[in-house]
Amino acid sequence: MMPKLNSTVSVVKISDTILEFFKTNTRQQVRIKVEDDSILKIVCGLDGLKSIAEIAKENAVSLDELNPLLNFLSSKGILANASPKEAFDEYEKFRRTIHFLEDFSVSHDHLVHLWQNIQNAQVLIVGLGAVGSWVAANLVQSGVRNFILLDPDKVELSNLHRQFGYGESDIGRRKVDALAERLHDFNHEIKVTKVCEMLDADILDSFNDEKIDLIINCADQPNVDTTSLWVGEYSMKRGIPHIVGGGYNLHLSLIGQSVIPGSSACVKCFQKQLEEENTIDINRVKKLAVSNRKVGSFGPMCSIIASMIGMEAIKILSEDITPANINRRGEFDIYSMDVTYKIFVRREDCEWCGHEGQYYH
């Protein structure tokens, strides 16, 4: 073992008796009490080039004195037990992602485990439009290598101002084909299964033989509520984590919830709470005069939402980093640049995940 200080960790001498390790990605602080600058010297010399015995000899300390310190730092994710460059085949390509994961790992082996989970996972993205196409880009850039892309549409000129991966030369082509090419341009080792079909319950059932680790629903046909229920029920049956992939309405954008079957509120829980809170007097509702209205959206707004969804997806795929949007969903205001969140709870009376629910476990 040749211990090395993680590249994302800063060491700060707070006072003569306090030494702080600052994990820059997660903004976490770890502080220890020290008697003098000897520990600071040891820590700053952890460069991955010397064995523990060599470090002990260089600093005139015994192994019995040094090992507890190194074990503590390792348990807090402050040390890397090997050089990432030597441990990962595609280190140069994904080094920033790997260093980000370091702050969530407690050892080199744990870091490798997180990275392999992400690379080996298969993600089903439903809908390759203004959110889904950007989500796919975020995931391939983060190391995901296995995709199922589902979308029935062909590229249209009106798609280009807000969707990733399509150009004028792609107009008339199937979205699944055009986007798969863009993803392969970034990483030729990825595997993409293309499904040019409209989402419905039967299409989802056709994936029963596939290993799917995450489903991200970005489909809005016939409407978001219906597609969320289709994806939600299929995922609950099979115990698959899934994310409601967001949407937009004028200057507001929805950041959809992350659902972990058996652990979080399910889509049906969200639906029941919203129905109770949004009960209205139908006698006071006026009919909408323009039935085919088009709400506004543009590229930056769509990509912001997709980036948040992509970050949630990486947490879930790691299988060891807790997602933030469990039991809540957010709304991003493009005017104020504020995000507000609404909290939901897992309901005892839920037909799906309640104690007497169909998919309770």
Image (cartoon, rainbow, N blue to C red):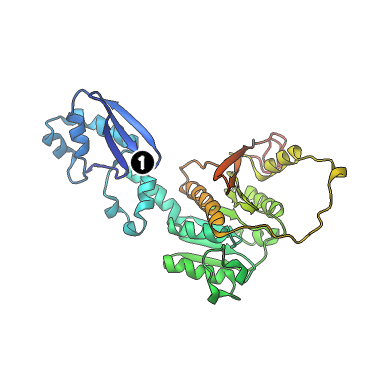
| x, y percent for residue 186 | 42, 65
Splitting the image into 4 quarters, where does residue 325 fall? top right
Compared with residue 85, is residue 172 higher up or lower down, i.e. above or below? below
| x, y percent for residue 168 | 55, 74
Compared with residue 193, is residue 307 higher up or lower down, i.e. above or below? above
Disc 1 residue crowd, few under 14, some 14–19, many 20+, Cα 10 Å: some
Residue identifier under label 1: 24
Compared with residue 104, is residue 186 higher up or lower down, i.e. above or below? below
Splitting the image into 4 quarters, where does residue 141 fall? bottom left
Q: Quadrant of the C terminus?
A: top right
Residue placed at 83% from the left, 46% from the top? 285
Q: Helix, strand or loop at disc 1?
A: loop
Front position in the image: 345 or 117: 345
| x, y percent for residue 31 | 32, 28
Q: Is residue 127 visible?
A: yes
Disc 1 residue type? Thr
Q: Residue furthest front?
A: 335
Q: Is residue 89 visible?
A: no
| x, y percent for residue 189 | 42, 66
Splitting the image into 4 quarters, where does residue 279 fall? top right
Front position in the image: 339 or 319: 339
Residue placed at 34% from the left, 45% from the top? 109
